[in-house]
Image: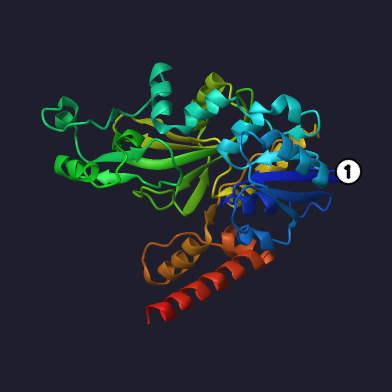
Amino acid sequence: MLFKDAVTVLIIDDDSGFILSVVRSFSGYPNIKADVLVTSTKKPGYFRNSRYIRKIYRELLTEENFERTVKEVIVKSSADIIIPTREWISKLIYRNKESLEKVVRISPLSDVKTIETINDKWQLNLWLENNQFPSSKTFPVPERFENDQVINSLSYPVLLKPSLGQGGTGIKLISSRDNLKETVAMNGFDRKGYFIQEYINGFDIGINIFSVDGRILCHNIQKGLFQNQLAYSKGILFVKNPELLQITSDIVSRLKYSGVANLDFRYDSKKGTYILIDFNARFWSTLDGSRMAGINFPLIVTAYSLGIPIDFPGYTTLTYFLANAAVKTFIGNLFSKKKYPLRLRHTKLAVILKDPLPETVNAIEKLIAYLKKLVTEK
């Protein structure tokens, strides 16, 4: 992919864990400069030490100041394109799209209603049901448990899930009616923010996409190597799956979705079909793996937004591990009969070795904090 002219990308982020992978996607392209606008009251996270970031701007963004503040940073940065990493930032950009497009290119985004529907797991499931797509059985958390027909009819285990959240945070596997009752009765439990979902016997599989007006331009599919976890798998295998791609294409087309996204499915072994569980309208934790498999999503989004001709490539099937999972898998392979295919160049460790300062500083800061805690406790 050829960038003949100099390009400045302004990434708008709230100090999330996605920003380093996005920034590192532009490494190897000297004509592309990456600036970051981080909305946080705290010092920017360890991503600030990446050698691929030209400049970091710190501004606390709100609905009221968003348009004015972002425009000011665009002028300072001389940005050619802005790319958000979080759903709430995407919504604010969309609300101010007409004004912002006068001064900068904007990566393809869906409208606010679509983002809010797919970001809310409860609303997403209702949408799937209403549009005749495979869906899971879901129920609201009842006010009372006595004589509640839904609770009494549930087949355990079930999942207790927050409507909003990412990475499996807050999801609880409930083994029995009493377990459900005890969990809901805990202090601080937000009954209205959770719902009950059937537990589907099967396996996790996901698809990463870049779509414009409901048409998927490029994708890759990843299957978790470590199954039966409530959080996303830290090791994945990129696979080909025409059936899953077709289901995803139908959903994305019906939504007329625009932008990057990571869709998490669960294969239902009883029904023999794939059920969409999460639709994350943002970049994802294994973005570096997608790049290693042949699809550099941030780069493709940038080129498309700037009108640069693109050949949307296919992708290879390989395994990818996040850093901690790579270390644990390497050790496990030494002592276990079950061996996972592991190559250093297909792990997050290989990415870190090329840009080591962020994670090195982070490790040192954590060590210092730990030692201070030990001294304080003594």
Q: Position of residue 279 (x, y in %)?
A: 49, 34
* Amino acid at the residue labelled 1: Asp
Q: Is residue 215 left or right of residue 98?
A: left
* Total marks placed: 1
- For the N terminus, the quadrant is top right
Q: Position of residue 11 (x, y in %)?
A: 69, 45
Q: Which residue has dot 1 on it?
A: 5
Residue 274, quarter of the rendered image: top left
Q: Is residue 82 above or below residue 371?
A: above
Q: Secondary structure at mark 1?
A: loop
Q: Is residue 273 above or below residue 182?
A: above
Q: Position of residue 260 (x, y in %)?
A: 61, 36
Residue 356 shows in this picture: no
Q: Is residue 88 left or right of residue 234?
A: right
Q: Position of residue 160 (x, y in %)?
A: 30, 40
Residue 112, quarter of the rendered image: top right
Residue at the image position 66 percent from the left and 32 percent from the top: 93
- Quick one: 97 or 242, which is closer to the camera? 97
